[in-house]
Each structure stands twice: as C-alpha cells, then as structure tokens.
Image (cartoon, grey):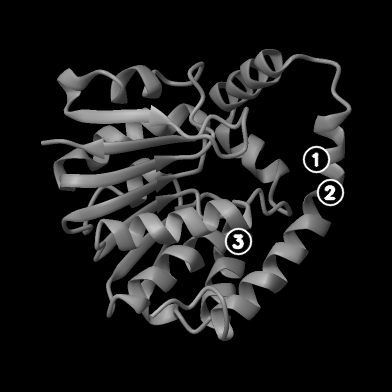
Amino acid sequence: MESLSTGLVADVLHRLHQEAEIADAPLMQTFASESRSREEIISQAIAAENRDLNEVYQRFAGNFLSVSPRFGRFLYMCARACKAKRIVEFGSSMGISAIYMAAALRDMGGGRLIGTDLEPGKIERARANVAAAGLADLVEFRLGDARETLASDLGEIDMVMLDGAFTLYLPVLKLLEPTLRPGALIVGENAFEEASGYIDYVRDPRNGYLSLSLPFDPGRGNELTIKTR
C-alpha cells in the first residue's frame, strides 16, 4: 500500500504544497536577490539564532519553510525502509513533512510520530493539516523548545527528522541518543557544517554513526545518518 499517489493524503499534500509556494514566494525572492554569499547568509542566520531564537522564528511564523515534494517522498521512503514505528520530528512547521512520515506509518499498519515546534500558530495549523489528511490518530505535536518538549515520554525511536533551528541540531540529537535504536535513521535538512558541530559529530564513527550528505536541493545541507550502535 502507498498513499502518496492518490486519495486523501495525496490531495491534502498537493493543496499544502501550493499554499506553501504562495506563502513563501516573497521570502524566496528575497533570498534569490541577496548579494551576500551563501556562507554569509548562513553565518548571519546562526548569529541571529544565538541572540534570540524565539524572535527569529516569530519572524517566520507565517512561512511554511517546508520540504519539497521530492524530499517529502524521500522521508516517506526512509520511514518505510527502516520499518519505523516511532518517529520524532524537530521543527514541524505547518505539518507537511509530518504528513509524509505519518502516511508511511499508516501504510505499514500504524505507529506514532511526535513533532515539536516553537510557534503556537504553526502547531495549530499542523494539527489541522494532519487531521485533514486523516492521520491525526498517529501524530502528537508538542509546543515549545525541543530541548524541553523532547526530554521525556518518547519510547524507542526508529527515525528522526531535524528541520528546526540550525544551532540546536546537535543538542537535540544528543538529547534523543538514549532513545535511538541501533539502525535508526536521522535525516537532517539544512544541517549546515557551520552550525552547532552537528556534521562533525555524526560523521565521526567514534560517536556511533554513519553519515553522508544527500544530493537533494544542493546548498541546503541535507544529511542522512544511521545509528550504528
């Protein structure tokens, strides 16, 4: 069974990707017109997060900042490949990526996805979007700082999606490590080498991971990691 091509999930995802394109168009145009280098943009974004994380993400409260349909399908395939039963998502935004992963759980017979986000409005919309896709019974969204919302009541985790504040990827991963089963998949979108030491950490086999960059959306720093022990 595969629910991404036809039916309710496919229809909701199609609608949400259209909404995301419209909502994020001005922001994408601003980025496209930037005279600063990619490295400068990332460096300034990291500095802003370090100054005031809440302020940064309040500024993007109306933006989806979501995965592409291609990357969403990749997440669905990852969940199915590792036969995930429990998935954790850091940075759920409007719920598009959660729908892809929850659809995989449903197509494999069930499971649980725990997502978290700083923005109350995004959590509200994510819940509505997941419900519209008929997947609400599989998904729990937690509002607040992931270092607090993901500190307990997770169970053994089969897959992690990191797509929140760049500077928190490594702290969040270390928080989750005791709950990761051997063979768990960790997908880091926008996992930039300049932020938090995450890339250096997961690429060091002494830390119990096998990791490599992904060819999706060049420049966005996508990283696939496997927990080896």
Q: Callout 3: few (<14), some (14-19), or many (20+) C-alpha neighbours within 10 Å?
A: many
As measured in the structure, the alpha-carbon distance from the residue carrying label 1 to the one carrying label 3 is 17 Å
The answer to whether residue 21 shows anywhere in this view is yes
Q: What residue type is labelled 2?
A: Ala
Closest to the camera, between mark 1 and mark 3, is 1
Residue under label 2, please give it: 25
Q: Which of 163 and 152 is in front in this view?
A: 163
Q: Which amino acid does label 3 sit on?
A: Met
Q: Where is residue 192 in the image (x, y as percent from the top left)?
A: 51, 24
Q: Where is residue 169 in the image (x, y as percent from the top left)?
A: 41, 33
Secondary structure under badge 2? Answer: helix
The answer to whether residue 143 shows anywhere in this view is no
Residue under label 3, please give it: 94
Secondary structure under badge 1? Answer: helix
Secondary structure under badge 3? Answer: loop
Q: Which residue is drawn at 43% across and 21% down?
A: 196
Checking the image for residue 28, the label placed there is 1
- Sequence-wise, the earlier of marks 2 and 3 is 2
